[in-house]
Amino acid sequence: SIEELESYLSSLILEDVAFENISTELNRALPELGKHYCEYIIAEYKKRNHNNNIYIRLLCELIINLYSDCHFTTKFLCLNYDNSYIFSLVNLGDDYKTVFESASVSDSIRRTISLRRREQRRSELLRKLRNTLEQKLKRLQRTIDLLENEEKSEERLSSYKLWAELLISQENGKIKPTEENYMTKDWSDNEIYIPVSTEKTLIENAEHYYGKIRNAQQASRIRKQRLPKYKSEFTILNDYRTQINNTPSIDTLESISQQLSIPIKKTMETGKEHSSKFRTFTLEGGFTLYVGKSAANNDELTMKFAKQNDLWFHARGVSGSHAVLRISGKDKPTKKTIEQAAEIAAYYSSARNASYTPVAYTEKKYIRKPKGANPGAVIMEREKVIMVSPKLPAGSVGDE
């Protein structure tokens, strides 16, 4: 009854308690209300009480009304509050959006738990993506800055060229300078000091500068090829970062993860796999492909990491990386998924530049390694062969 509740609360909540602390006090007195019901009662209390005073009787009336509404409800709700999903027996106000309602309590609870798990997975994937993108963007920015700074250093080439020409033109070119700053005159008959090594002759110092010029010119050609690629990749990754900062859906996050070749686990309960040693690609249907990086690495991937029912791929008749398609549960890869895995296996083989390459595959349990065989050498049984064009998934940012 209201009287019994009033007596109980009066013993725990003092009427002179600060108004802003009433929510904390009520939660302490009636912990079974929980955070959300408690905040709902306080919100209703503030609507009726504008004097910032504590009236235990009014609180008791609101609590009894809430208990009654919960007891006689015929609709069970799933509410969304601040991206959290809450099962509730009553509507809790404007801040709580009704996602769905049902006449079945079990159906409502089941769907609420499902949405919670989905949101938990979305949050975990969002956290993982943010960390990955930040690391990739920082590395790219450092690389771009380094290449741009090296580009500016090309101004020194004109000095190197002048010094080399002046040193090679000296009549006594076979002598070693006595000081590290060799004084001579330039083409305008002005004195100039050239940094030299006292352990080399003037001609050898000139050859040293010619070598610097050749190295700088080669580095410049490489920069001109790489810098646009790195800047383009930076723009793409920065666009991804903008997308994930705008409260994206889990579908959007999974799509970005596939573009970045980040393995996506189907359930939050699945443990993290130790895959950092291998190249990883997420294929159609959420399947993950692991690719070896060396002969010894291939052995570890095939003989230690792969499970019996995983599919094993290798370009037929040529040297190349082992590739393992992880098979979890009862889900089977589609024909498209197998083609993608074969294309990647062909790409990481000596047949990478071929138009089409045969790729053999079978279950890992049919792969064995003879005693004393070289690293990466195995014997395959019950193989199937598929013809594919060597390539990586579109938009892949995999490590080489």
Image (spheres, grey):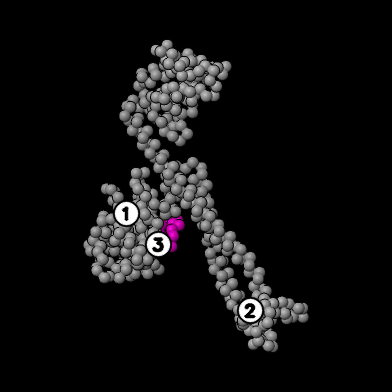
Residue 374 location, quadrant: bottom left
Q: Amino acid at mark 2?
A: Ser
Instruction: Say which residue appears at 51% left-offset and 51% top-offset.
Output: 134
In the rendered structure, the answer to whether residue 203 lies left or right of residue 300 reads right
**Residue 390 image position (x, y, % from top left):** 38, 64
In the rendered structure, the answer to whether residue 43 lies left or right of residue 316 reads right
Q: Which residue is tagged 2? A: 197
Say which mark, if any, is on residue 391: 3
Seen as rendered, the residue at the extreme right is 189
Check contact, mark 1 vs mark 3: CB within 8 A. no
Q: Which residue is tagged 1? A: 326
**Residue 303 image position (x, y, % from top left):** 29, 61
Q: Note whether 59 is above or below 80 in the view shown.
A: above
Q: CA distance from mark 2 to mark 3?
A: 51 Å
Q: Note whether 12 is above or below 312 in the view shown.
A: above
Q: Which residues are magenta?
A: 392-400
| Within-10-Å neighbours for mark 2: few <14, some 14–19, many 20+ | some
Q: Which is in the foreground here, disc 1 or disc 3?
A: 1
Q: Which is in the foreground here, disc 2 or disc 3?
A: 2
